[in-house]
Image: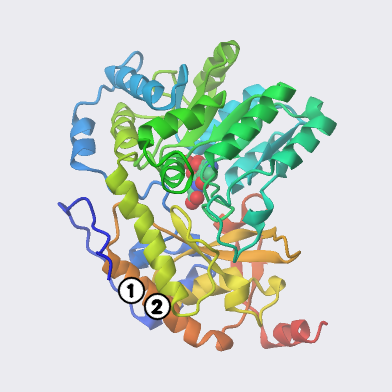
Amino acid sequence: MSRAVLEPYRIKMVEPIRLTSRNEREALLQEAHYNMFLLPAEAVTVDLLTDSGTNSLSAEQWAALMIADESYAGSKSFARFEETVRDVFGYTYVFPTHQGRGAERLLFSVMCKAGDLVPNNTHFDTTRANLTDFGVECADLLCAEGMDLQLRHPFKGNMDVEALRTLLREKRERVPMVLLTVTNNSGGSQPVAMANIRAVSAACREFGVPLYFDACRFAENAYYIQQRENGYSGKSIEEIVREMFSYGDGLILSGKKDALSNIGGLLCTNNGALVPRLRERLVLTEGFPTYGGMAGRDLEVMRVGLREGMDANYLAHRLGMTEYLGARLREQGIPIAEPAGGSSVFLDARGFLPHLKLEQLPASALAAEIYLEGGVRTVEIGSAKLSSGETMSLVRLCLPRRVYSQTQLDYVADVIGDVWKRREEIGGLEYEFKPEILPAFSAYYRPLSAVTEQELATAD
Ligand code: F0G
């Protein structure tokens, strides 16, 4: 047997978890309208809702917090932050924002106008919603491998470069930039290969279009390149990160992911011509350019986190844990999107509950059952078309960084295994209330009535 995947840290502070009974969870689910986002966190045993802002800080981050400079303008904390960001990513101009969404809006406000078209491998929900809010059309150009749930391929986050070239050939004048999301969160947390980044960059250069990265999980992507791509096993994560970003013109980043912070975001660019407008928009919407949307303390935490997030031992453990959880589910016969992704493992809700139709919201129904079974909070992820022509429906198990132990993941695998055993009894849900923008965050659901179930069953 191979050795256990060792946590390269030890626990210094603990936070108790309150355990709940099944009856309690049943009542809580009803009160939360079966939406995982509306549950009180206190009633969650293992919280795999997101890896965003849920990270544990290190001793060094807590220490950095104490030396923060809270000056409104020109703080030492910003100078240190800017120096680190430039060194890690290699871009010249650095703008802090309160989180990823702040950076998205800032970039789109200076680059895009109504009627434009922005391609991405897969737009994350908030990116898509923000672009749509600016009147911009979004194109997802994920490679064919990325649209086959069962296929094991090392870089299922790659962009379809031929599709990008075709789009640029036909619609160049509508495209103010190309975005590339590393890792590709909505497409199963799958990485993008260096060869693909290079090819996307070459296409962008050929057509004179800027390339920006949505770089939240930059370190996990770099680790996969080191492990899986020819020619990179001898390179450090830091070197790989520098190379990845050398092919682009800038990035937007949520510090709440690989930068191991609880809040914060970032926009970088090499385009000096954008700087006056970026400063203007930043002052108007986030704050003075040397703090953006962040306290000096948050700048310090993110500065240290950016480096710690690239530690090879930490990354080996983190990605080893998603692989471990994936293996524990697979061995029980539970259908997951293959392979396990960077920060997450995705359950294939349609494979798990084949008796439910898409209108019966299998992913939301499965997330609710997993919570009911053992207090494990997961999240339903928006649907997209697969290469088979079917629409996928996924439940994401997303691991906060440096938070849960292997025993807690074993518990998660056991709970989902118990739901799997009684899968045939699980009924569907329907919307009680569906907001227009980002519905997953605040929708109300309710169990389908027996009559509606009957109608759907006989519909075809
Ligand atoms: N881009 C990607 C790829 C993301 O995963 C997220 C957030 C954002 C942008 C927006 O960043 O939350 O700081 O405003 N993803 C979280 C998630 C919410 O759960 O995957 P933010």
Label 1 element class: helix
Q: Amino acid at mark 1?
A: Tyr
Q: Residue at x 43, y 80 (%)?
A: 417
Q: Residue at x 72, y 60 (%)?
A: 387
* Residue 18 picture quarter: bottom left
Q: Amino acid at mark 2?
A: Val
Q: Residue at x 71, y 71 (%)?
A: 359
* Foreground of the two, 30 or 129: 129
Mark 2 lies on residue: 415
Q: Is 14 positioned to the left or the right of 317 in the image?
A: left
* Residue 236 picture quarter: top left
Callout 1 touching callout 2 (CB < 8 Å):
yes
| The residue carrying mark 2 has its beta carbon less than 8 Å from ligand 1 | no
Please rate how many residues cluster around mark 1, counting C-alpha atoms within 10 Å: few if below 14, some from 14 to 19, many from 20. Answer: some
Mark 1 lies on residue: 411
Question: Residue 460 appears at what percent x and percent y?
Answer: 83, 82
